[in-house]
């Protein structure tokens, strides 16, 4: 019998005994929750900031007399009533009610992202920037703490960075996820490792660096960042797209927690203790 | 295992819960942050001091990126007040600013009153730089003007001075308590930075009214609201306490960070 078949038998027919193991270190748990809070405020204040100029471009500057826009969230006032739209690479989708034109207390508002997606709930660029940069420091500082701690205690190498074995197990792991079949083990599964490594080593650094690339003062410190990203306005676009990727990650992450057993998953990220399936093979 | 097997209903409800947790952001619980005196907001603005210190440490006197002629793809985008209606401004404009003077006052040994011709007779600097608005857009243009450092040198800044206050001719807000004209401020590090110029030219032409004629400030390592247009007076000060609401300028008094290097 192949490994796969054997395993499937075990999963299907033997309800495994389970034991509590210490799974998440204090570093992982604290940084996890600080990031959760920081990302919440960064996202909602960021969308308020975006509302100040709801167009994204590719290049060094913003085309007012030429066209380098790649995304617009706006409203068409030639129609009555005005119609909200999102336009990506020239393709326009009607979005009245959510993007461009939305309702607040029975009033139609002209704003890219609706009131319920922004902090503050009304347009306030000054306040949104205060909130955004405060939590930008929190996010970056926490990432630095996590990196140092996880490189020193081996967490990054041992638990997060996917290895050759993980890649070999990946197809099977994808199939398991598609069937919503979860194993509860000390180690993260390959898809978890890939997504966590993607967030910690790609998305977080990328969103921080593209944020810094938008800072005129930081441009003086590290002008090569502008060349790397292809100009300030491209950096702004990448910042936005990385945000979308992080939102997608959070949604999938929360759904997976709920699907895999929210009590057990939450306990491990709060107390560190996790009820694992008994190992079915060595 | 059955306890962990999901049926479709549970999966969908999990998805809905995840989505609605995002929608929870919709509440206006955090609108209190908009109150300029909210203690948590005060606390969060501390991040601006941290940014200021970190960027001063890292940037030192380094230059903002400069661009080539081919990067200028459009006229400089005007913003904010683009045609001051103030009578005194209109009178100066009607006479092509021949009667206009730039006053340099405050904590200086040698107060100045300079005509545009005098400013243009001083050594100039031309630079192609990117203008970044706080709203998020950018526009590349070529600016010509006199380095602020030279003007400050002539005025002989007193050692007690810490900031340069820019006073403008354009009324940006008409209120019951009177009209407010634009103002802003920078520290002496930015004031003496080689790219900080008092610009009278833009894209090879005399500075247009929409862009701040006769004179505007360029502070290339900060955002647009730190580069006032329609300049009439430069004042050297040691604090903003006695000026407006005490935050160092029009937008600063209205909750925008004093340091706009980010």
Image (cartoon, helix red, strand yellow):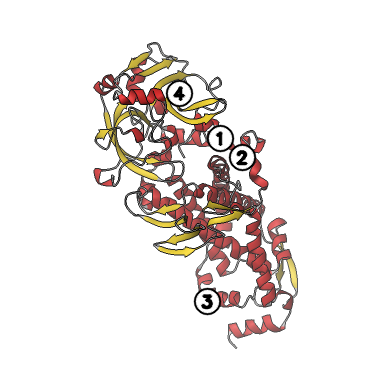
- The residue carrying mark 2 is B34
**Taking B61 as reference, is A121 above or below it?**
below
**Label 1, label 2: how many angstroms apart (C-alpha)?**
9 Å
User: Considering only order in the chain, which callout, 2 or 1, is on the residue closer to the N terminus?
Assistant: 2
Instruction: Identify the subunit bearing mark 1.
Output: B
The image position of residue B208, as x and y in percent, is 31, 34
Which element type, helix, strand or loop, lies under badge 1? loop
- Disc 4 to disc 3, C-alpha distance: 64 Å
Q: Which residue is mark 1?
A: B255
Confirm whether circles 4 and 3 share one chain.
no
Q: Are marks 4 and 1 in contact (CB under 8 Å)?
A: no
**Marked residue chain, label 4:** B
Q: Which is nearer the N-term, disc 4 or disc 1?
A: 4
| Residue wearing tag 4 | B165
- Please give the chain letter of the residue carrying mark 2: B
- Chain letter of mark 3 equals A
Is the same chain shared between marks 3 and 1? no
Mark 3, residue position: A171
- Residue count near mark 1 (Cα–Cα under 10 Å), binned few <14, some 14–19, many ≥20: many
């Amino acid at each position: 019998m192949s490994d796969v078949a054997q395993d499937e038998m075990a999963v299907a027919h033997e309800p495994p005994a389970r034991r509590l193991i210490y799974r998440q270190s204090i570093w992982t748990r604290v940084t996890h929750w600080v990031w959760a809070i920081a990302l919440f405020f960064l996202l909602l204040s960021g969308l308020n900031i975006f509302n100040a100029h709801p167009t994204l471009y590719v290049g060094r500057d913003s085309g007012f007399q030429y066209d380098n826009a790649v995304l617009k969230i706006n409203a068409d006032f030639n129609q009555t009533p005005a119609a909200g739209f999102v336009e990506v690479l020239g393709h326009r989708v009607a979005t009245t009610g959510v993007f461009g034109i939305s309702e607040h207390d029975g009033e139609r508002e002209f704003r890219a992202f609706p009131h319920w997606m922004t902090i503050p709930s009304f347009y306030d660029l000054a306040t949104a920037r205060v909130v955004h940069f405060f939590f930008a420091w929190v996010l970056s500082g926490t990432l630095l703490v996590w990196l140092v701690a996880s490189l020193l205690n081996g967490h990054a190498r041992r638990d997060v960075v996917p290895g050759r074995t993980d890649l070999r197990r990946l197809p099977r792991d994808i199939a398991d996820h598609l069937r919503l079949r979860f194993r509860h083990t000390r180690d993260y599964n390959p898809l978890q490792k890939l997504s966590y490594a993607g967030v910690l080593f790609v998305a977080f650094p990328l969103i921080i660096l593209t944020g810094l690339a938008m800072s005129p003062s930081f441009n003086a410190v590290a002008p090569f960042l502008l060349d790397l990203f292809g100009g300030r306005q491209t950096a702004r676009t990448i910042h936005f797209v990385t945000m979308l990727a992080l939102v997608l990650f959070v949604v999938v992450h929360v759904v997976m927690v709920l699907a895999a057993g929210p009590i057990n998953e939450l306990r491990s990220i709060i107390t560190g203790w996790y009820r694992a399936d008994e190992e079915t093979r060595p | 295992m059955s306890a962990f097997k999901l049926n479709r209903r549970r999966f969908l409800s999990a998805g809905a819960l995840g989505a609605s947790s995002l929608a929870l952001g919709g509440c206006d619980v955090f609108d209190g942050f908009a109150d300029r005196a909210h203690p948590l907001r005060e606390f969060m603005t501390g991040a601006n001091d941290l940014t200021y210190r970190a960027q001063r440490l890292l940037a030192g006197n380094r230059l903002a990126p400069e661009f080539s002629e081919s990067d200028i793809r459009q006229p400089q985008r005007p913003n904010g007040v683009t045609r001051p209606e103030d009578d005194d401004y209109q009178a100066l404009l009607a006479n092509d600013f021949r009667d206009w003077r730039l006053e340099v006052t405050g904590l200086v040994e040698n107060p100045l009153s300079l005509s545009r011709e005098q400013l243009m007779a001083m050594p100039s600097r031309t630079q192609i730089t990117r203008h970044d608005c706080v709203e998020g857009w950018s526009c590349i243009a070529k600016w010509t003007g006199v380095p602020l450092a030279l003007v400050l040198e002539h005025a002989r800044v007193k050692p007690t001075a810490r900031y340069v206050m820019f006073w403008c001719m354009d009324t940006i807000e008409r209120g019951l308590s009177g009209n407010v004209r634009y103002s802003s401020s920078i520290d002496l590090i930015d004031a003496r930075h080689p790219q900080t110029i008092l610009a009278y030219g833009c894209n090879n032409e005399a500075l247009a009214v929409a862009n701040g004629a006769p004179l505007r400030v360029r502070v290339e390592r900060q955002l647009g609201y730190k580069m006032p247009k329609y300049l009439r007076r430069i004042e050297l000060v040691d604090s903003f306490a006695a000026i407006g609401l005490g935050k160092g300028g029009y937008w600063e008094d209205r909750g925008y960070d004093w340091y706009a290097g980010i």
